Amino acid sequence: MSDPTIKGLPPPPVKYDGSPFRIAIVHARWNDAIIGALLEGTVNKLKEQGVKEENIVIKTVPGSYELPFACQKLIEAGKTQSSNAAPSMLASTTNLLSLIDNAASAPSANPPQPAQSGTTASTAPFDAVIAIGCLIKGSTMHFEYICDAVTNGLMRVQLDTGVPVIFGVLTVLTDDQGLERAGIGRKETKGHNHGEDWGLAAVELAAQASDWQKGIL
Ligand code: RBF
């Protein structure tokens, strides 16, 4: 008998091409068995949608509470990296002037690195960021506070930066709920790996946001 459930994500109306996009993933390390499976599901789906492996940047933070800050900084870093890699005419003029102004000053501790030869990795700003974490309820109010802060924080980052931030944070009441939502349940039904949905959502939002940015509806 087919599953009578009506819950869940149907396939997108069109298949979006992920090949032009650069996607960042930031994941928490708490509850690492669950996180590992979610990360794998996310990356596999991104690649299935055409995102190039070299254009998937993965960073980690200790816990989910750190995710909003890390996403915001990574989005900024992507923009900075992009402007360092391809300076505009105005920026190059400014850079030349600053060379004269700063001729006697000490060199930067972290000078921009040239692209490694042979790599085709993009240095464009990120088209979407996926925040992955798993919060499991304990016996205190900690869970409620972190869930609330992370959810609001991630929403704020995407609205403030204009870069889609995919909410890949499980907020579960038991270990089993977490394992099942990562597709590694202990019962006969392993459950569904929600990382796959997050990979799909990232490509869909990146494609739509990039069109909308150009005025294409
Ligand atoms: N981080 C998670 O990503 N998932 C958790 O289930 C989780 N549970 C926590 C429970 C307690 C009691 C504490 C103190 C922290 C927990 N964290 C968890 C870590 C939290 O997100 C953050 O990394 C730390 O609070 C440091 O800012």
Image: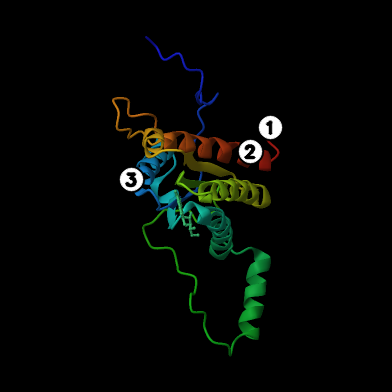
Q: Check disc 1: other Cα within 10 Å, few if <14, some if 14-19, many if 20+.
A: few
Let me know if residue 49 appears in the view: no
Mark 1 vs mark 3: in front: 3
Q: Can I make out residue 165 in this image?
A: yes
Q: Quadrant of the N terminus?
A: top left
Mark earlier in primary sequence (2, 1)? 2
Image coords of residue 28 (percent x, y):
44, 52
Residue density around tag 2, few if under 14, some if 14–19, many if 20 or more, within 10 Å? few
Q: Which disc is residue 116 wearing?
A: none
Measured in 3D between alpha carbons, the distance from the residue under mark 1 to the one under mark 3, in whole angstroms, is 41 Å
**Which residue is labeled 3 in the image?**
33
In this view, the residue farthest toward the right is 215
Residue 209 appears at what percent x and percent y? 62, 40
The answer to which of marks 3 and 2 sits earlier in the sequence is: 3
Looking at the picture, how far across and down is residue 3, in whole percent?
Answer: 41, 15
Q: Residue at x 45, y 69 (%)?
A: 113
Residue 211: assigned label: 2
Give the residue at mark 1. 217
Question: From mark 3 to mark 2, how far is it between C-alphas?
Answer: 37 Å
Q: How is the image coloured?
A: rainbow
Do labels 2 and 1 touch, CB within 8 Å? yes
Name the quarter where the C terminus is drawn: top right
The mark lying in front, picked from 3 and 2, is 3
Residue type, numbered disc 2: Asp
Report if the CB atoms under discs 1 and 3 are less than 8 Å apart: no
Q: Is residue 184 above or below residue 31?
A: above
Q: Quadrant of residue 92?
A: bottom right
| Amino acid type assigned to the residue bearing label 3 in the image | Ala
**Residue at image x 45%, y 67%?**
114
Horizontal relation, residue 21 to residue 119: left or right: right
